[in-house]
Image (cartoon, rainbow, N blue to C red):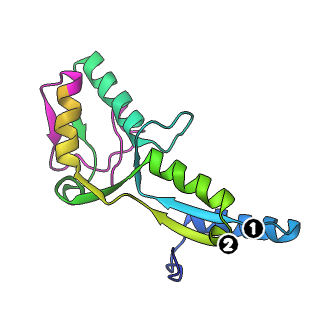
Amino acid sequence: MEDLPRLNFPNFYYTLEDVIYEEVAKKGMTWSVHRPDVIFGFSPHSLMNIIVTISVYAAICKHDGAPLIFRGSKEAWNSYAIASDADLIAELQIWACVDPYARNEAFNIHNRDVFKWKHLWTILAEEFGIEEYGFEEGESSVTFAASSYNFIFL
């Protein structure tokens, strides 16, 4: 469970949580908040599954003969990141719907799987048959407005 205070900076999710708290209080309902990390795994109709997003990026690169360039920072490329499995998230959400201990609680959810973007990028390039891939110094954090091939990973 998450019981630490909020960080002192604007965060879109804080606004969403506040709306939920207000609405359920009006109706006498309970709530639970689920905070996954990067979501891996099958998740139909989910815009939060990054594997689908980067696979589309790889497919476009493959189709156009473009290199599969990681558009994040050098720190992100070399550091460990944490993933949340879609099935585990689903199990938590089902449990939270039926177990009284989950009422009015917030949960950070991940299954302690760690990865490095540079390792994932190698696998992605191999799966799509892309020979030129990786991180390029000075190429990070470029927006969609600058190029049709740019994704941002922080």
Residue at figure coordinates x 67%, y 57% from the top left: 97
Magenta stretch: includes residue 133 = yes
Q: Seen from this angle, which residue lies furthest right? A: 27
> Residue 146 in the image: x percent, y percent?
36, 38
* Mark 1 secondary-structure assignment: loop
Magenta stretch: includes residue 28 = no
Dot 2 or dot 1: first in sequence order is: 1
Q: Majority secondary structure of the magenta segment?
A: loop
Q: Looking at numbered disc 2 in the image, what kind of residue is underneath it?
A: Asn
Q: Is residue 22 left or right of residue 52?
A: right
Q: Looking at numbered disc 1 in the image, what kind of residue is underneath it?
A: Thr
Task: Please name the residue that numbered disc 1 is placed on.
Answer: 30
Q: Seen from this angle, which residue lies furthest bottom? A: 5
Residue 12 shows in the view: no
Residue at figure coordinates x 63%, y 71% from the top left: 101
Up/down of 61 relative to 120, above or below? above
| Crowd band around label 2 with a 10 angstrom C-alpha radius: few (<14), some (14–19), many (20+) | few
The quadrant where residue 46 appears: top right
Q: Seen from this angle, which residue lies furthest top? A: 63
Task: Please name the residue that numbered disc 2 is placed on.
Answer: 104
Looking at this view, is 90 or 95 the one in front? Answer: 95
Q: Magenta segment range?
A: 127-154
Residue at figure coordinates x 33%, y 46% from the top left: 142
> Residue 130 in the image: x percent, y percent?
18, 24
